[in-house]
Structure formats: C-alpha cells, structure tokens
Image (cartoon, helix red, strand yellow):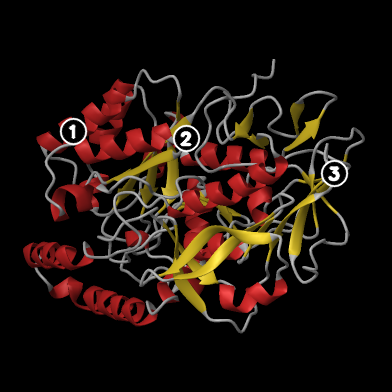
Amino acid sequence: MRPAPSDNWTDGRFAGPAAPRTLVTLSETALRASRPRVREEQAPAPCFEASRPLGLFDEFRVPYSLGAFEPAHSLHDCAALRWSWATETPRFVYWLPADPAAHAGEYRLRDTAVFGRVLLDASIREQLDDGWSPLETLDATDGRPVASIWAHADGSVLLPFDPDELIGNLRGERYRTIGGRQSSSRLTGFARRVYYLVRPVVPRRLQIALRRRFARVQARASFPRWPVEPSLHDLQELILGVCARVAGQPLPMLSAWPGDFRWALVLTHDVERRVGYESIHVLRDLELRCGYRSAWNLVPRRDYDVDAELVQELRDGGFEVGVHGLHHDGRDIECLRERLGEIRDWATQWGSTGFRAPALHRDWEVMPQLGFDHDSSVPDTDPYEPMPGGCCSRLPFFVGDMVELPVTLAQDHGLFVILEHDDEAAWLEKARYLRGRGGMSLLITHPDYMLEEARLAAYERFLTEFHDDLTAWRALPADVAAWWRRRAESWLAWEGCAWAVHGPAADEARVDYFPSRP
C-alpha cells in the first residue's frame, strides 16, 4: 500500500504541481538543466506548463508539461511556467535567461548567498507595466538593494535570474570564481600544490602544526559557512515557494528517501596507510556490534597490499568496497588520464561501484569521466580541508551520469587532529540538524586515526545515538546511489483525485508536499 502524503517534509526538495499529458521525468545532472524524458498520461490534472525544461523541477520530480504558449505581460524573452488550472486568468512564473555577456556577481537574497548573473532593477524597470511591484530584494555585498523579485497584481511572479544557473553555481562550486573570489581560489590552489610537493620530506608533527595554524586562517572564510551552509536549500525553498504562491496550493513532489525513512545515515572509511589497513577490523567489529555496515575505500598502490580475501570477506559481511584513488599522493585527479585505466581495473577486481578522491580533491569537469556509478569526493561545507569549499547540498545529486554523495559530517582527522575536538558532539549536532531537514549524514572516518580509545568511544556513542531511530535509513553508498537513480526514473501522475508514484520507485517513494499540509 502506498503511504499517505507526508505532512512534514519542508527541507528544500520541492515540487511544482501537477501531472498533465506530458511529464518531465529524468534529471541527468544537477549542475546543468537536464534533458527530460517525457511520458504520456491521459488524465488531466492541476499543473504547470513550461516553455522550457526547469532543472530544479526535474531534480525534485515535479510533474509539469512542456509546451509552446504565448507569455503574457509583454515578457516575450522570458522562460515561463504557466498555471491555468481553476483560474480564469493564467498566472505565470517568469525567469530571465541572463545575458551571457552580463557580469556574474555575489548577492544576498534574505540571508541566502547567491552567485551568478542577475538582471538589475535599473535595466528591467522600463520593461514592466504598472501592475508589477517588488516582492523580494536582492542586495549587493555592500548591502545596497540592486535587484528584485517582482509580483504582478494578477498573481504572476518574475525572477530576475535563471534558477538553474544560481543553483548550479552553488552546487558546482563555481562561486569560487565569482564576485572577486578568483584570486583567492588561485592562491589556495597554489598553496595546495606546494604543500603536496614538500609533504614527503616534512616531519609528521610539523605537518600537523602547520595545518593547525592554517586552520585559523581557513576559519575566516565567509562562504560556505561551517558547519552548516543553508544557502542552496534556502534558494530552492524560496523559488519553489514562489511556485506555490502562484499555484495557490501545496505542490506535490517525490520523497527524498524510500519507505518510511526520513533521512539517511551513511558510514564510510578511507584506508590511507598500512596502519589503517591492518586496523580495519577494529572499526569493522565495532560497527557490527552496533548493527551497522559501512563502505571501505582502499588505495591500490600505496604502502600496503590489498588482500583479495579481505575484500571478499568485507563484501560477504554486507560491507562495500570502493576505490580511493591509485597512489593517494595528491595527484590522482590531476593525473587521472594516466591513472584511470588502472583505477578501473582495480574497481573491477574488487567489485567496486564507488570512488572517493584522496583528500577530497575534485575537478568538476573531470569527475564525470571516472566511469563509476557513484562518487563521494565533495563536502557540503568544509573550510579546513586542503581543498576548502563545498557543494552546499545535504542531498545526493547527479554529475553527468554519476551520483554524487556529499560528505556532510566533519572528517575524523580534521575534527580530532586539526581542530582538536575530544568527543562526538560536533557529529551529533550536525547529524541532528540533517535529520530535522531530511538530509543525508555521510561520515568519513579513517582506521589510521581512530585507534585512540577516546576516539573509538566517541564513534561508538555516535552510532548508539541513532541505532533505534526508525526514521534513519542506515545505508551503504551503493544503496543510496541505486535509490537515487530509481527515484530519478520515477514520476508523479494524477489519478482522478490524488497523486500516485509511477516508475521504478513506485513501491518505495512517498508523495510529499510543499508547503507541508497541516
């Protein structure tokens, strides 16, 4: 039996209404507007009709139709959503494809940081008739109001930006080079290359001391904020709230997680050196006692040889085995063309479908070339890593045809060694935040750094905290990626008087609403 619509799902995975004759069904990438598949449905339903695909709706499984229609309000150059169900006069949501030559900047929308091309009030006022008035203000970084979201007297709304562009700039970390941040990004990249060049000859104690001192500098970063950066999901909520305003009713969407689960808890381990490899059993046995399974990311060519029997033992025990680069020398992504063939050979040998780049080094142009089913090489926010930044997402998303699983909890090395925390409080606080917003808590720990009794006790307390939480999906990365694909291939259809889920996730997904129903 399909669960009843949820009444408490308001974390940013939202829908636009309706299921008409054609339904957009598949988001191929979260960094660019997707190319949707279309399915034919016969039953009419309350719906938006769009003049072009909207990646935000595709991602959150918003049922809408694609069609050619004439926009009102003399805004012929705009992309538009049209809402015409149960209204005599159609209402529209317009968004302006920004001029490619326009300068991309950093702005504030309420307390939300947005990065991209925005059409300023000074350049748009002359195009609007007297029925339009400002609804929300976008401010420059110095606090000056420079642009607006506009509302019309008939209920239509105009966005002065392309939603998919602004979302993509956050999730794809393109904010690094927007609004005067490019020089800082280049300096950080140069410092990282120098660090990995000299690291082999720098004593371990000095490495840690330097990292701790540099962490004080990294802590000054204004964006993304740590430990939580809500801008991406706040932006999605605001845009979809505009759609709910225009529709005048709650908007249906597919649940983020299967069944009755409301959030996900995913455990992973990176095995960096021999001491970690020889200590795999310590964390593995602790997890077994607490009723968990996890993913182990191994390095094929470092200072330990991976025993095929151990790989099989882990897999037989319900654990997952992934590939953690080839050498873990800071150059696996930089030298990917030369190393990818051997990386894939090891993946085949180990039965691995997942990849994690060493030290979370990533290149958004390169990552889709990995050929893995899923990757987990980007934090949601982390200023303390060698490559600081983050995708700002608490949910999985597509990069090309690969599912990206953001690392949303602080790594053990950064937390215990660099920041010198002595317990699990930071993990618990962030996990509770993510639970409250239906997100994914994905943790990296290293058997290399977790051998101290106090750290093992902290890890066990963290696991025990959520052991009896029936709303938590304690899943492997491969399980999450497989679910995310089934969800992306599923769609909502109007069946007379209610929404129903069709497709591969029909027996698992729930119909949720935004705003949540009372």
Residue 175 x/y as whole percent: 44, 69
Marks 1/3 in contact by CB < 8 Å: the verdict is no
Residue 438 badge: 2
**Residue 509 in the figure: left or right of residue 472:** right
Report which residue position mark 3 lands on.
39
Q: Earlier in the sequence, mark 1 or mark 2?
A: 2
Q: CA separation, marks 1 and 3?
A: 50 Å
Q: Residue at x 46, y 51 (%)?
A: 393
Q: Secondary structure beneath disc 2?
A: loop
Q: Amino acid at mark 1?
A: Ala
Q: Earlier in the sequence, mark 1 or mark 3?
A: 3
Q: Secondary structure beneath disc 1?
A: helix
Toward which corner of the image does residue 435 lie, by quadrant?
A: top left
Q: Earlier in the sequence, mark 3 or mark 2?
A: 3
- Quadrant of the image for the N terminus? top right
59 versus 289 height, above or below: below
Q: Nearer the viewer, residue 244 or 283?
A: 244
Report which residue position mark 1 lands on.
458
Residue 61 x/y as whole percent: 68, 42
Q: CA separation, marks 3 and 2?
A: 29 Å
- Quadrant of the image for the C terminus? top right
